[in-house]
Image (tube, grey):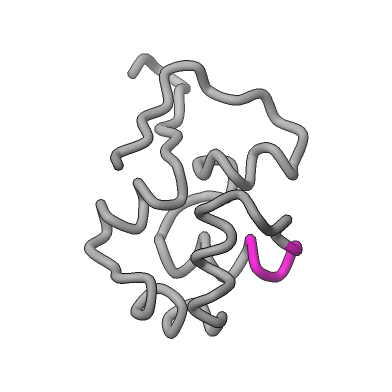
Amino acid sequence: MGDGEIEVLSLRGWRRRRLHTIRSLAVTAQAAPRTIVELEGGRREPRVGTIRAVSAALGVAPEQVMEFRRVMNLPADEEAIDDR
């Protein structure tokens, strides 16, 4: 990554990198595990509060999470890693 670039991963990618299970991330973000599963699977549009809570729990900025970038109308990072 060059100067000024941010690392963008999928929600699943960040969760795994931070060594969270679905349940542990849900507990830390004070969200239901089902919410995390649905966000990762693209079956739920995240609300602002959820974006903030999950991002904080992962220790990343919201714009570093691909699923959140879509909601924020930011371009998808073509070099983003899914980390499945």
Prevailing secondary structure of the magenta residues: helix
> Magenta span has 50?
yes
Quarter of the image for the C terminus: give it. Answer: top left
Q: Quadrant of residue 59?
A: bottom left
The residue at 50%/41% (across/down) is 64
Q: Relative to 80, is 45 above or below? A: below
> In the rendered view, would you say 22 is above or below 81?
below
Picture residue at 51% right of the left edge, 54% below the top? 40
Which residues, given as a range, are shown in magenta? 47-51
Placement of 65 over or under 37, stated as above or below: above
In this picture, residue 14 sits left or right of residue 34: left
Instruction: Looking at the picture, tell me which residue is in the foreground, 2 or 53.
Output: 53
Residue 39 is drawn in which quadrant?
Answer: bottom right
**Residue 73 as seen in the image, left or right of residue 32:** right
Picture coordinates of residue 68 (x, y %)? 63, 47
Residue depicted at x 50% and y 16%: 78
Is 38 or 11 nearer to us in this picture?
38
Above or below 70: residue 27: below
> Does the segment drawn in magenta span residue 23?
no
**Residue under the point 75% across and 62% down:** 48
- Residue 69 x/y as whole percent: 64, 39
* Residue 29: percent from left, percent from top: 50, 77
